[in-house]
Image: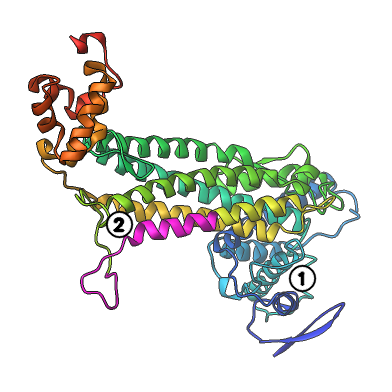
């Protein structure tokens, strides 16, 4: 065991622990088991690397410009900087995550997150120099690992990096799902389907029309998500505690975001008002609203398919893929687990949206103390949406089957509402007589018309062709 100290006292830690006293205090203060985001952790490594590289450039520029003068500032040695950069690079690749022990839900505006990262980087850097963890007289979590940084600019900047990286994944997953839905649309063109409004049989439609609505909704989702990078690209890195850049060299402030942009390949920009980017988090509210809209579209789509593929549908034309055994007692039962997973996930997203809105509004004066929970909810939503799109693509749409009834005897032709298609030809009241006969005699529209002789059979068949039923209205030529 080793002993570490802070101004509150001392604590014992395992000799090989890469975390330190500040992380241990946080675990004791925040006894929650919710795991911190791995994407955010890696992004923090990248942000730290950008800071160390910017520090090196500042150091070299200062020594070059003032080489003949004694500077009023002592610099971190090249050996220390090399070790810090190597350590940050390891974190950006996901290494040492098991030593990140601070939970996702916490107080303190992310100070515990930043210090856990600083301690891991310091101790990894010490190992690079052949030293044991905790020898902070050589590399200190505050003096070296946190140089020219503040929790209040590092944590939200890393969140932005993680969110933008996940947004790119989400954008791709939406487009892949949209393409699969489009294939279903093309495959089932002019395949007749009974339409429903308010859970009641309505006028008929086609399956390609249904899939086209999902395709259009996903296209809108893809377009909106593709714009989210623009909405959150401004970061406050270099702004320090409250965006004023206090105790940070101006050279570093001007350089560090460009360095981060180079490392990530993301269109990040330094906010023109670093204080605004520090204390106002409405950009995350705006982006999450877009994500919620995508969640709404997914819920609508899977809810439809869950109903259409259920035993409640007598004709059962839609066959959902059989993914897993559905009951521990009822033989051969299969449940719509993919739609159920998506519905469960999107309702968690709705809860995240409420939390993000509420906590962003709880920002107080020059800082928002709730950035850890805001960030956790945002990244949780992104991961859930990516997971939803991936499982819908792989486990639902890839093997979705439509087995329509033969067109002439399709159940849609037995629903009285289909008489709506004849109103332009025979008038409303005659259509009512036709619908009533179908309803009372339990016969289809062809048999009912045979009795009432309202229109020729050939004309009736022409009017009731699936492609004619969905042709977007009629022309006067159709009535001839």
Residue closest to the eye, 183 or 167: 183
Which percent across, then down, holds residue 334? Answer: 26, 65
Mark in front: 2 vs 1 = 2
First reached walking from the N terminus: tag 2 or tag 1: 1
**Residue 199 part of the magenta-drawn span:** no
Distance, label 2 to label 1, CA atoms, is: 50 Å
- Vertical arrangement, residue 371 with respect to residue 137, above or below: above
Residue closest to the eye, 435 or 155: 435
Look at the numbered disc 2 and give the secondary structure of its residue.
Answer: helix
Residue closest to the eye, 163 or 454: 454
Residue located at (42% from left, 37% from top):
217
Residue located at (23% from left, 22% from top):
430
Which percent across, then down, holds residue 471? Answer: 26, 23
**Residue 345 part of the magenta-drawn span:** yes
Which percent across, then down, holds residue 480? Answer: 17, 9
Indicate left or right for 23 with 322 as reference.
Answer: right
Residue located at (32% from left, 52% from top):
307
Q: Which residue is mark 2?
A: 395
What span is in magenta? 325-349
- Vertical arrangement, residue 419 with respect to residue 222, above or below: above
């Amino acid at each position: 065991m080793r002993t570490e100290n802070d101004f509150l006292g001392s604590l014992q830690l395992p000799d090989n622990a890469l975390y330190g006293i500040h992380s241990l205090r946080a675990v004791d203060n925040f006894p929650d088991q919710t795991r911190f985001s791995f994407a955010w952790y890696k992004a923090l490594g990248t942000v730290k690397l950008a800071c160390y590289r910017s520090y090196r450039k500042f150091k070299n520029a200062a020594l070059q410009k003032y080489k003949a003068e004694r500077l009023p500032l002592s610099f971190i040695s090249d050996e220390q900087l090399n070790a810090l950069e190597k350590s940050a690079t390891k974190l950006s690749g996901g290494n040492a995550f098991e030593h990140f022990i601070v939970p996702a839900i916490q107080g303190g505006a992310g100070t515990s997150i930043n210090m856990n990262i600083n301690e891991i980087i310091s101790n990894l850097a010490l190992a690079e120099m052949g030293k044991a963890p905790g020898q902070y007289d050589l590399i200190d979590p505050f003096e070296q690992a946190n140089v020219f940084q503040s929790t209040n600019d590092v944590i939200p900047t890393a969140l932005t990096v993680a969110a933008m990286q996940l947004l790119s994944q989400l954008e791709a997953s939406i487009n892949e799902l949209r393409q699969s839905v489009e294939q279903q649309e093309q495959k089932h063109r002019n395949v007749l389907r009974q339409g429903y409004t308010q859970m009641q049989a309505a006028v008929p439609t086609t399956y390609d029309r249904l899939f086209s609505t999902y395709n259009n909704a996903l296209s809108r989702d893809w377009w909106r998500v593709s714009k989210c990078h623009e909405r959150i690209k401004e970061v406050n890195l270099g702004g320090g505690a409250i965006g004023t850049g206090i105790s940070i060299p101006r050279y570093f402030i001007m350089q560090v975001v460009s360095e981060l942009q180079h490392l990530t390949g993301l269109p990040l920009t330094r906010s023109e008002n670093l204080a605004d980017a520090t204390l106002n988090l409405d950009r995350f509210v705006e982006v999450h609203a877009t994500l919620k809209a995508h969640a709404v579209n997914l819920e609508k789509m899977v809810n439809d398919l869950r109903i259409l593929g259920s035993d409640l549908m007598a004709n059962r034309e839609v066959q959902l893929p059989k993914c897993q055994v559905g009951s521990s007692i009822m033989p051969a039962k299969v449940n719509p687990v993919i739609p159920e997973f998506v519905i469960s996930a999107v309702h968690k997203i709705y809860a995240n949206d409420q939390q993000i809105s509420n906590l962003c509004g709880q920002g107080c004066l020059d800082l928002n103390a709730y950035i850890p929970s805001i960030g956790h909810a945002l990244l949780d939503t992104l991961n859930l949406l990516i997971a939803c799109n991936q499982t819908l693509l792989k486990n639902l749409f890839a093997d979705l089957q439509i087995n329509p009834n033969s067109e002439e005897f399709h159940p849609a032709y037995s629903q009285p509402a289909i008489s709506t298609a004849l109103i332009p030809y025979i008038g409303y009241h005659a259509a009512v007589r036709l619908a009533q006969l179908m309803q009372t005699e339990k016969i289809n529209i062809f048999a009912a018309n045979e009795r009432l002789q309202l229109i020729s059979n050939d004309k009736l068949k022409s009017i009731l062709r699936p492609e004619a039923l969905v042709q977007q209205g009629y022309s006067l030529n159709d009535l001839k």
